[in-house]
Every structure is written in C-alpha cells, then in structure tokens.
Amino acid sequence: MSEAAAATDPAIAGLDVRPMATRIGAEIHGVDLSGPLDDGVVDAIWSAVLRWKVVFFRGQRLDHAGHVAFARRFGDPVVSPSRGKASPAAFPHVQTMIDRLKLAERYGQDRAQWLDRRRNTLLHNWHSEHFQR
C-alpha cells in the first residue's frame, strides 16, 4: 500500500479513516460504537461506507443490543432467513456461529470441516451488519 493510501482520508471529516487499498476497504479509528453517536459521526461513517464499500472498526466491544442499535442508525436491520434456534431469541437480527454450523451441517459439512475452514479463513472473528436503507 502506498504511503498516500495509508494516510487518513481527508474526505471523511471528523473521522480517522485509513484506506486499506486503492479502491475498496478502510479502517475507521477514533470512534466508540458502544456509546451514543451524533448524527454528524453517523453521516461520516456512511460517507466512508459509500466511498470504500467495506469499513472495519477494530477493538470495539458491543453486545447484541449494541450491534443492533448501531445498525439501526443506518437503516432497518435484516433478519437472516437461515437464522436458527441457537441465536438469541431477544435479538432476531443476530445470527450466531452455531447457527452457521448447523446450516453447514445441513449441506453436508461436518463440525471438524467447518471448524477447520473457519480457522483457516480471513473471515475469522469478524462481524457484519445487513440492513435496508
């Protein structure tokens, strides 16, 4: 990555946005997603999503309610049609990895294969929000 690409993106005012590549992906630093966010910060995050398509917030500590509250700042969270009974009943927008394992088993992948695949993927320990705006 070039030095210019690693620098903070000046186009997203008020946030420390660090592009990870030339065209897609950025890390956003200096914001605590567990607390209240003013509209200006939410607008800046949305601008970063529109510009970089994928954004990452490292080191955040959110419970299920916090994840859903954050997602609602951008639209209506979507309930996954593959969501199973292991996911928390009080949070229909949250799908646990246990439900993902059960879905994999339904398509012929056993637990050991699923765990090995998760251990050897870049998707290990990440979270995504799906919402309609």
Image: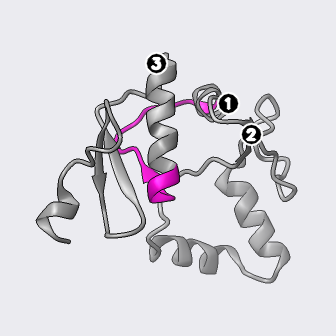
Pointer 1 local density, CA inside 10 Å: few below 14, some 14–19, many at least 20: some
Q: Element at badge 3? A: loop
Q: Amino acid at mark 1?
A: Arg
Tell me whether the residue at label 1 lies in contact with that at label 3, contact meaning CB atoms closer than 8 angstroms: no
Q: Which residues are magenta?
A: 50-64
At 50% from the left edge and 29% from the top edge, which residue is drawn?
A: 42
Give the labeled residue for mark 2.
77
Q: Residue 83, image x and y in percent?
A: 82, 53
Q: Is residue 25 magenta?
A: no
Q: Which mark is residue 35?
A: 3
> How far separated are the C-alphas under marks 1 and 3?
14 Å
Tell me if residue 17 comes above or below residue 117 in the rendering: above
Q: Amino acid at mark 2?
A: Pro
* Res. 126 in view: no
Q: Quadrant of residue 133?
A: top right
Left or right of residue 22: residue 103: right
> How far separated are the C-alphas under marks 1 and 2?
6 Å
Left or right of residue 119: residue 13: left
Q: Earlier in the sequence, mark 1 or mark 2?
A: 1
Q: Residue 2, image x and y in percent?
A: 16, 70
Q: Element at badge 1? A: helix
Q: Is residue 56 magenta?
A: yes
Give the labeled residue for mark 1.
72
Q: Which mark is residue 92?
A: none
Left or right of residue 74: residue 61: left
Pointer 2 local density, CA inside 10 Å: few below 14, some 14–19, many at least 20: many
Tell me if residue 11 comes above or below residue 75 in the rendering: below
